[in-house]
Amino acid sequence: MLARIPPTACQLESVALLSCPVRSVLGGLSALGRDGFSGFEPESPTIVIPHGGAFPRRDGLIVHCSTMLDSRDVHPLRIPPRTRPQRNLIDEASWTPTTRLARSTVSRT
């Protein structure tokens, strides 16, 4: 990225996906934000990589592995590729460190 201005969240997410294995997708708060949910601003791009895929050698990413990245979980038409909103809510709630924060995540929708 050659611009003199800081990259946008969308640009950071796109670059993050390029550094990940094939079939990697946006997940959690990153995907929810792209689908228009407000109040979902991740600290770093959240990426879900296929189980067994190599973790990206890039700082500043939140990376999770999944064995379930087929059409039931990944939206077939969204660019960049991302998991479906229903799954993102469940994933994000399960990734949070406390039950209270998990409830807050789900209740914001």
Image (tube, grey):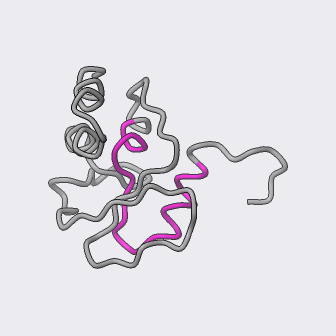
43 horizontally vs 97: left or right: right
How far from the left and from the top, in percent, is residue 40? 42, 31
Closer to the camera in the image, 64 or 15: 64
What is the magenta range? 11-32
> Is residue 65 rendered magenta in the image?
no
**Residue furthest right in the image:** 4
Q: How many marks?
A: 0
Q: Is residue 26 above or below residue 28?
A: below
Closer to the camera in the image, 89 or 35: 89
Q: Residue at x 19, y 58 (%)?
A: 71
Q: Residue at x 35, y 50 (%)?
A: 27
Q: Quadrant of the N terminus?
A: bottom right
Q: Residue at x 59, y 52 (%)?
A: 12
**Residue furthest top in the image:** 108
How far from the left and from the top, in percent, is residue 59? 57, 63
Picture quarter containing residue 47?
bottom left
Q: Is residue 91 above or below residue 33?
A: below
> Is residue 21 rendered magenta in the image?
yes
Closer to the camera in the image, 70 or 68: 68
Q: Residue at x 41, y 30 (%)?
A: 36
How far from the left and from the top, in percent, is residue 20? 45, 70
How far from the left and from the top, in percent, is residue 83? 28, 50
